[in-house]
Image: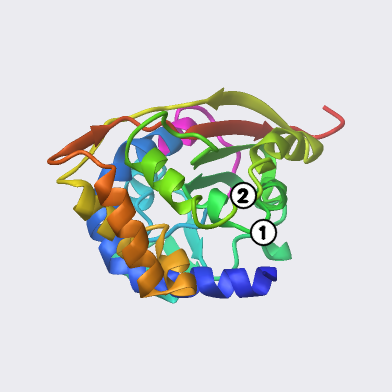
């Protein structure tokens, strides 16, 4: 599939998922959002705005605005549906803006401008994550900080994410899972020094397996796949997933990967 086709499917999927994502996943992902924001607000930053690529509904904004009230904060997302909700969230914040656009390659106007780049759970959805993170790194000013959280190859040994992955891959091949290995080299090549490479884990729970599956395919990262393969395919996955899942409340503790890096001039 061409990158343009993948991005179009991604945008449509998140357009359809936006409201449900805000209601279901934003509260569950809040601890990781806090991790990402903490990393850029704990120490000094150079002058410049804060950029949030793949901002979704912009859950990073309230904490960023509270801790860095003198900074402009811009969210960028491909999905018109996400941008609409992000702009609603940004309404009370006079220094916040939201733009619709492709975060996989930033426009040249961002190059060397930003004090920080913050992104939570968007990187792994992009066609070439290592290229994207290199583009994000290029947006930093000297001394600027990049804080990016994403879901790695394996976020849990067991649990709904792991079991759903097993079901999906019975029916379709796994995609490229080597890209996480290229992220640190991409940052180093861009002149950044990786200060932290961690696996923060937080508890999450779902009312039951059916609620999780429906949220994932209607209001989460499974929506683009559901659009591409159709409702009959999704119904087959759902039946297989529920047959192998526990009953009742399902609690788990997935771990993300968190990269924190700072830009240094090559002559420093």
SS of the residue at dot 1? Answer: helix
Task: Give left or right: position of 139 versus 234.
Answer: right
User: Decide: marks 2, 1 in contact (CB < 8 A)?
Assistant: yes
Q: What percent of the width, then of the height, locates residue 120?
A: 46, 46
Q: Is residue 83 above or below residue 183?
A: below
Q: Specify the label residue 156 is tagged with.
A: none
The 10 Å Cα crowd at callout 1, few under 14, some 14 to 19, many 20 or more, is some
Residue drawn 62% across and 52% down? 175
Q: Is residue 91 visible?
A: no
- Residue that badge 2 annotates: 114
Separation of marks 2 and 1 at Cα, in angstroms: 7 Å
Q: Identify the magenta region.
A: 37-48
Which residue bears the numbered disc 1? 110
Q: Position of residue 117 (x, y in %)?
A: 56, 46
Q: Callout 2 environment at 10 Å: few (<14), some (14 to 19), or many (20+)? A: many
Residue 219: x, y in percent?
Answer: 32, 63
């Amino acid at each position: 599939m061409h990158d343009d086709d993948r991005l179009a499917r991604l945008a449509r999927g998140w357009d359809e998922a936006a409201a449900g994502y805000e209601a279901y996943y934003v509260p569950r992902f809040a601890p990781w959002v806090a991790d990402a924001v903490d990393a850029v607000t704990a120490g000094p930053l150079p002058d410049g705005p804060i950029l949030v690529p793949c901002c979704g509904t912009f859950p990073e904004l309230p904490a960023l605005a509270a801790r860095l009230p003198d900074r402009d904060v811009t969210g960028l997302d491909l999905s018109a549906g996400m941008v609409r909700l992000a702009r609603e969230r940004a309404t009370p914040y006079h220094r916040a803006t939201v733009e619709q656009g492709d975060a996989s390659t930033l426009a040249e106007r961002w190059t060397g401008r930003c004090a920080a780049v913050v992104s939570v759970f968007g990187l792994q959805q992009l066609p070439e994550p290592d290229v994207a993170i290199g583009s994000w790194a290029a947006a930093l000013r000297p001394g600027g900080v990049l804080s990016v959280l994403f879901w790695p190859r394996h976020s849990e040994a067991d649990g709904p994410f792991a079991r759903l992955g097993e079901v999906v891959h019975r029916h379709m091949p796994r995609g490229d899972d080597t890209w996480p290995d290229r992220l640190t080299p991409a940052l180093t090549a861009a002149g950044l020094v990786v200060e932290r490479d961690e696996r923060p884990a937080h508890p999450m729970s779902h009312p039951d397996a059916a609620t999780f599956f429906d949220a994932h395919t209607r209001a989460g990262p499974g929506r683009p796949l559901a659009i591409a393969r159709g409702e009959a395919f999704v119904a087959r996955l759902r039946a297989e997933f529920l047959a192998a899942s526990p009953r009742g409340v399902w609690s788990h503790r997935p771990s993300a990967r968190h990269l924190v890096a700072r830009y240094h001039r090559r002559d420093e």
